[in-house]
Amino acid sequence: MNFQALSTSTSIGVIGAGAMGAGIAQIAAAAGHTVHILDAREGAAAQAIANIQAQFLKLVAKGKMTAEDANAAAQRLMPASLISELSSTGLVIEAIVENLDVKRELFSSLEAVCDASCIFATNTSSISITSIAASLKNPARLVGMHFFNPAPLMALVEIISGLATSKELAETLYATAKAWGKTPVYAKSTPGFIVNRVARPFYAEGLRLLNEGAADCATLDAIMRESGGFKMGPFELMDMIGHDVNFAVTQSVWRAFYNDQRFLPSLIQQEMVEAGHLGKKTKRGFYNYDDHATPSMPNTEGLAKRPLDITIFGNSRAASALAHRLHSASIVFVQGEASDDRIVQADGVVIYETDGRTATHRAQANGIHQLVLSDIALDYEKATRIAITVAHQANSQTKQIAIGLFQVAGYHVSSLNDVAGMAVMRTVSMLANEAADAVNQGVCDAASADTAMRLGVNYPRGPLAWADEIGILKVNQVLKHLNDFYGEDRYRVSPLIQQCIFAGTTIYA
Ligand code: NAI
């Protein structure tokens, strides 16, 4: 049975009137609940209410809320100065400092004043729900309700159950989040829940590529945006989040998983934190945000001669889009019978899509010296940039021929030093691998993992759906090759992906 959302006659307590608490209070008041806001800092609750009221007025000005609704919602917000003022609430959402002992103490005080039927929710982003609940007389009443910043704008809410959490209460909060216009997903209380766990490789693989000298930050960011379809590349995103915050989350997930290499923090990021280069907020991160700083530009290859003799092989997504783009540019090419999985051959240069090996390794394995690899794109038809890497065995014209080919097809070309798995393929494979592990370990189901990543961090596609699109066999191959190349446990393939391959299915089939 599915439990109903809390009715709007249920009054709600929000504790912590900071960035998150204020956002949550705004959502609950707009949805029709009376909201009591409590903060340890004097005046903070009243200030938050004034700010929320200003937000309502902005929504009215934008035509997103009527003046009557805004006024009524504003009237439903009340400051509280004592915990006892929350005694009549049916749900209390905690959004105070991220500290286990402080949170435990707060919930114990609440338990002493609130009715036994009052649901306790915590907005913690990294502390175990099981652990916060453990100090309660009734740990079943505590549920994780993890909103994303800024809460009024971000649709995702992770509804997290600890070991003792009541299924009914989790379902009630799921329905309530939905009634508030959010998209909830269920998750089990494990380090990072869904989003903060599955997103780790997005930053980590970027940092590893930088560490290996694959390219500079601006080039890697441009590839992730313009080929990968991500709204932001990893470096600009880390600069925006703040390296102190991002590094702390990585460290907390890594420690919580007993130093699993999958989550290993980066020394480059540690240096940034130690130097106080925290990103936008300190005007210095991977990029320089000083008013007069020259913007960093990605490396884009200069114009190369267009190849004369082009053969496209097979009808993979990359090959079909290339054929289409060349056709639109009135470039003559031949459609060939594929003898292996090459995409295209141009003036004797053979181009494959990366399979997780370096171009140099592939050239040696295939016995082809004039060999180039291309990275994947989210949408090959629309992508504006493509990354390539060239085998060390290749002659000096090889790179120019590959650049010329992709340029006539309308791509900006960025060349990477010859790293395994390139940028988009390697990152997406690792995101899918992490999502697959979360599913395999019962943290969430596949659809929730994908929804969480699309809505919690705005990924252009859920990593598992993306893996199905790339082909689960290919993703498996990429991970295996990365594992062989680096010899690190980090790239071990998730049992879920392996089982899909043995069963001949896809993740979603
Ligand atoms: P914040 O620092 O903006 O606000 C915290 C507020 O809690 C402050 O106003 C502080 O005075 C108050 N406070 C601290 N201890 C208190 C206590 N014992 N009793 C009453 N009030 C107390 O913090 P923010 O960013 O709003 O985070 C709050 C919680 O939400 C944390 O658990 C955090 O991990 C989590 N979270 C934060 C996100 C973010 O992006 N900032 C995203 C999702 C969750």
Image (tube, helix red, strand yellow):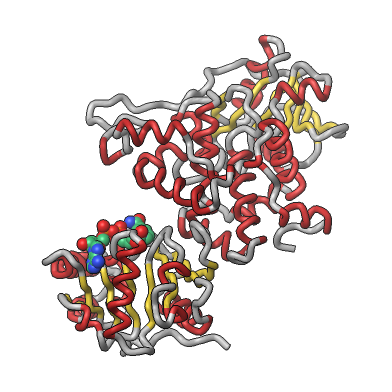
Assign the N terminus to one quadrant of the image: bottom right
Q: Horizontally, is 107 left or right of 179 in the view?
A: left
**Count of numbered circles on the image:** 0
Assign the C terminus to one quadrant of the image: bottom right
Q: Position of residue 288 (x, y in %)?
A: 31, 29
Q: Quadrant of residue 465?
A: bottom right
Task: Give the residue displayed 78% in from the left and 27% down from the top.
Answer: 311
User: Could one spot residue 17 in this view of the protein?
Assistant: no
Q: Position of residue 404 (x, y in %)?
A: 63, 21
Q: Position of residue 266 (x, y in %)?
A: 48, 36
Residue, far left = 43
Q: Quadrant of ligand 1?
A: bottom left
Foreground of the two, 7 or 413? 7
Q: Horizontally, is 44 left or right of 359 in the view?
A: left
Foreground of the two, 65 or 72? 72
Task: Give the residue displayed 46% in from the left and 40% down from the top.
Answer: 234
Q: Position of residue 379 (x, y in %)?
A: 61, 44
User: Could one spot residue 120 in this view of the protein?
Assistant: yes
Residue, far top = 396
Foreground of the two, 17 or 4? 17
Q: Quadrant of residue 9?
A: bottom left
Task: Give the residue displayed 18% in from the left and 64% down from the top.
Answer: 51
Q: In the rendered view, would you say 227 is above or below 446?
A: above
Q: Horizontally, is 22 left or right of 129 in the view?
A: left
